[in-house]
Image (tube, rainbow, N blue to C red):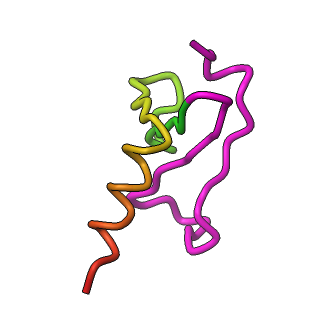
Amino acid sequence: MDTAEHLTWFKSSRSGAEGGQCIEVAASAGAVHVRDSKDMAGLLLHLSRDARTGFVGLATAK
């Protein structure tokens, strides 16, 4: 499993400098990783690429 220090993290371009409720994501060979941008040392969510694709599909369904 990749550790957070060895991943390249990306925050939404819609995130403002004032903080707020933001997540960051990073991709590795076997998973997509998600963390709270306000607590970078906190818990990480690791999703398989298939699980991430399903989640995004449901979250963006109209």
Quarter of the view holding residue 21: bottom left
Q: Is residue 5 magenta?
A: yes
Q: Where is 15 relative to 51, above or below?
A: below
Q: Position of residue 56 (x, y in %)?
A: 39, 62
Q: Is residue 9 magenta?
A: yes
- Residues in magenta, as a range: 1-30
**On the rendered structure, is 7 left or right of 33?**
right
**On the rendered structure, is 29 left or right of 48?**
right
* Secondary structure that dominates the magenta span: loop
State the residue at coordinates (34%, 55%). Answer: 54
Quarter holding the C terminus is bottom left
Q: Where is 4 relative to 34, above or below?
A: above
State the residue at coordinates (45%, 56%). Answer: 22
The one of 18 and 53 positioned closer to us in this rendering? 53
Residue reaching furthest front? 50
State the residue at coordinates (42%, 48%). Answer: 52
Q: Where is 24 relative to 2, above or below?
A: below
Q: Position of residue 38 (x, y in %)?
A: 47, 42
Quarter of the view holding residue 45: top left
**On the rendered structure, is 9 left or right of 37?**
right
The one of 61 and 42 positioned closer to us in this rendering? 61
Quarter of the view holding residue 60: bottom left
Quarter holding the N terminus is top right
